[in-house]
Amino acid sequence: MLSLLIQESSTFLDWISYPPGSMIFIILMATTTALISTGLTKWLVDTGEINRKQVIKKAHDEEKAKIIELAETDPEKYRKMRKRWERLDSMIKTSQQKMSLKRMLPSCITFVPMIVIFSVVRGLFGTSNPVALSPMNANDLPLIGSMMAGWTSETPEWTALVYGYVRTIGVDAGWINFTGWYFLCSFGINTLIQRLLKLQTQAQGGMEQMMGGSKAKGMEFPDV
């Protein structure tokens, strides 16, 4: 029985050590990580409350532009509305800080275990071993291309399954290594799962707040 388990584990390790097994394994790994992260978010974070506060923040930023327009047409009403907006703004900023801490809770729980798992699996695949073939050359990407590209210094036998003959894979062959393929899968699968579980509005709201916040900072109340 023990020898059978060892043989099966050895077969599995052989299967995931080169494409297409390595490519499929990393997709499954990214899917599992995304499900755990999203599940913790659903469990620990009140996403409904976060979405409501995002709507309030967006309306609050839009109101600032309307108040600024009153500076020329109705200065007295402008001063009253400005004071009320500034009082409400301090309350919203405090609420946003608490909301950001709540959002970070799932990441704080999963950060250390994910780093350990990622390091172990990355050690299994190596830093440069090819795991997936891309239609574009990863090495052409500025700054991060060399970190994503997969290549071999020898002529592995599995290359015959792809090219029909055994060959060496260079950095310009279009292959991606473990790190690059994992992060591509993780980004895409996370987005898909968030949409399926109706958490995408949370991520979109965060981007809207960043864009809206920078726009609001650019609009200053005139002194009237």
Image: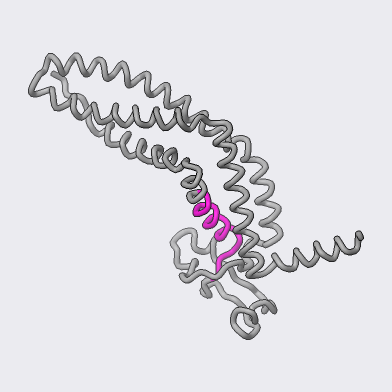
Query: Measuring 54% from the left and 56% from the top, which residue is drawn there?
Result: 185
What colour scheme does the image use? one colour
Q: Main secondary structure of the magenta part?
A: helix
Instruction: State which quarter of the image contains the C terminus.
Output: top left
* Residue placed furthest toward the left: 73
Query: Measuring 58% from the left and 42% from the top, which residue is drawn there?
Result: 37
Query: Measuring 49% from the left and 45% from the top, which residue is drawn there?
Result: 194
In front: 58, or 112? Answer: 58
Report the number of discs.
Answer: 0
In front: 50, or 132? Answer: 50
Rendered position, 81 above or below 27: above
Q: Which residues are magenta?
A: 175-190
Query: Measuring 59% from the left and 52% from the top, which residue is drawn there?
Result: 31
Give the x, y percent position of residue 113.
Answer: 67, 42
- Please give left or right for residue 97 compared with residue 127 in the image: left
- Please give left or right for residue 189 compared with residue 109 in the image: left
Is residue 183 on the magenta stretch? Answer: yes
Give the x, y percent position of residue 157.
Answer: 69, 79
Instruction: State which quarter of the image contains the N terminus.
Output: bottom right
In front: 77, or 145? Answer: 77
Rendered position, 146 above or below 115: below
Is residue 81 on the magenta stretch? Answer: no
- Please give left or right for residue 76 compared with residue 207 in the image: left
Give the x, y percent position of residue 97.
Answer: 45, 26
> Which quadrant of the figure has residue 166?
bottom right
> Which quadrant of the figure has residue 24?
bottom right
Rendered position, 72 above or below 183: above
> Which quadrant of the figure has residue 216?
top left
Give the x, y percent position of residue 184.
Answer: 52, 57
